[in-house]
């Protein structure tokens, strides 16, 4: 085996239980993008068994894959493109988000054809200026929704990872107004949901009837700078990424390494070749991260290539080819974390775990550490 991402499903369960307790309300586990790279179906099953009330995905095909795997929990898909096969969603009891009158009319048509009402959550734009009804909200009337079942209303925070920012209060106030309009149209049993992970952890006033937690169920902090690390938040990182050293070699000081010879060794040293590269989601620009081997950090040297990168194991290293190294883990032993890789790549932990490519097998283990 060259590399593997070990996913600790008991960590996912622990995080779901913790977040449910923290929010005191229903929890939708966000499993879009292959469960942030952790594996759609195993994570969804773990989340549901830990008490998640809903599963949330971006795409209809992600929701269909969950149903095909036999998962019967409520599912919400929030980026179902106009022109999609809404009848498939309705038949499979997949809740759909709608963010425009055009979407509502397409969903209504599919409902009439099937003689089964679609379950719809209306997405409203409260200041993120991305998805959701904005100006069209004022035109919405009962006619637009008479053939469908309006189950919920939701919106999304732009700055929940900065809890002191006024925009959070503004978005909550706007949300309340938009909810009030819908209630005035006669809808009273709505599931109202606004919070992502950061708001779930830091803004309980925004919990409403359900929270939508993504990154935190994977045990990662929504923002290490503003909210603190996983351990400060009492979350358990679920993924450990490991690889076997393909080759080790001893080189003299001043040896240039990799494409462009962007770096040279600063002393006589032992180098290790790791067979993971940007095709596997290791960012090409990563600088200042590396691997953990035998109790020590070995930083990347030179540019990351498509399928491999080189680490400086140090002059005293006893590493041999075939030895396993940890690329990131929960940090408890001193290994690099997904947070470290995010910082080393001008990015965030979300992007690091989500982009681990399909060539890397996911191994499910109850215990990593
Ligand atoms: C991705 C997503 C979430 C989850 O966000 P996290 O920061 O990972 O908790 C919640 N809601 C919507 C609409 C999303 O797209």
Image (cartoon, grey):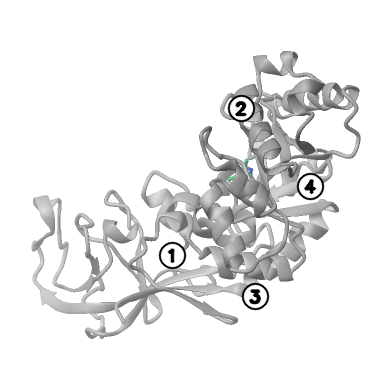
**Residue 221 locus on image (x, y percent):** 60, 53
Judging by the rendered image, the residue that carries numbered circle 1 is 336
Residue 128's disc number = 2
Coordinates of residue 190 in the picture (x, y in percent): 84, 38
Location of residue 50 in the rendering, given as x and y in whole percent from the top left corner: 74, 69
Distance from label 2 to label 1 (Cα)? 33 Å
Say which quarter of the image contains residue 66.
bottom right
Q: Specify few, some or many for label 2: CA neighbours under 10 Å numbering under 14, 14-19, or 20 or more.
A: some
Q: Mark 4 points at which residue?
A: 210
Q: Nearer the viewer, residue 53 or 330?
A: 53
**Where does label 3 land, which residue?**
10
- Mark 1 → mark 3, Cα distance in angstroms: 21 Å
| Residue depicted at 51% across the width and 64% down the height | 38
- First-in-chain label (1 vs 3): 3
Q: Is mark 1 on a helix, strand or loop?
A: loop
> How far apart, in angstroms, are the residues tagged by discs 3 and 4?
23 Å
């Amino acid at each position: 085996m060259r590399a593997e991402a070990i996913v600790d499903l008991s960590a996912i369960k622990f995080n779901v239980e913790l977040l449910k307790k923290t929010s005191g309300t229903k929890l939708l586990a966000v499993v879009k993008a292959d469960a942030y790279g952790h594996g759609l179906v195993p994570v969804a099953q773990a989340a549901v068994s830990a008490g998640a009330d809903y599963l949330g995905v971006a795409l209809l095909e992600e929701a269909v894959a969950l149903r095909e795997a036999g998962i019967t929990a409520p599912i919400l898909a929030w980026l179902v493109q106009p022109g999609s096969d809404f009848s498939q969603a309705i038949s499979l009891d997949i809740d759909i988000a709608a963010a425009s009158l055009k979407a509502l009319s397409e969903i209504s048509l599919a409902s009439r054809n099937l003689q089964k009402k679609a379950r719809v959550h209306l997405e409203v734009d409260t200041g993120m200026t991305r998805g959701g009804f904005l100006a069209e909200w004022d035109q919405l009337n009962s006619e637009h929704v008479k053939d469908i079942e309006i189950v919920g209303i939701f919106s999304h925070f732009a700055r929940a990872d900065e809890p002191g920012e006024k925009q959070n209060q503004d978005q909550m106030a706007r949300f309340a107004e938009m909810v009030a309009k819908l209630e005035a149209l006669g809808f009273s049993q709505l599931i109202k949901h606004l919070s992502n992970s950061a708001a779930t952890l830091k803004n309980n006033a925004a919990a409403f009837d359900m929270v939508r937690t993504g990154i935190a169920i994977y045990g990662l902090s929504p923002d290490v700078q503003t909210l603190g690390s996983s351990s400060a938040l009492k979350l358990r990182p679920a993924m450990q990424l490991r690889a076997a050293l393909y080759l080790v070699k001893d080189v003299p000081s001043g040896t240039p390494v990799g494409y462009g010879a962007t770096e040279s060794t600063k002393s006589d040293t032992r180098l290790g070749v790791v067979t993971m590269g940007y095709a596997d989601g290791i960012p090409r620009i990563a600088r200042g991260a590396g691997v953990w081997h035998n109790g020590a950090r070995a930083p990347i040297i030179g540019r990351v290539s498509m399928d491999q990168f080189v680490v400086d194991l140090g002059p005293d290293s006893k590493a041999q080819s075939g030895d396993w190294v940890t690329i990131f883990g929960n940090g408890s032993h001193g290994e690099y974390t997904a947070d470290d890789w995010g910082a080393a790549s001008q990015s965030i932990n979300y992007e690091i775990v989500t982009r681990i490519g399909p060539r890397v097998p996911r191994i499910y283990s109850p215990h990593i550490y």
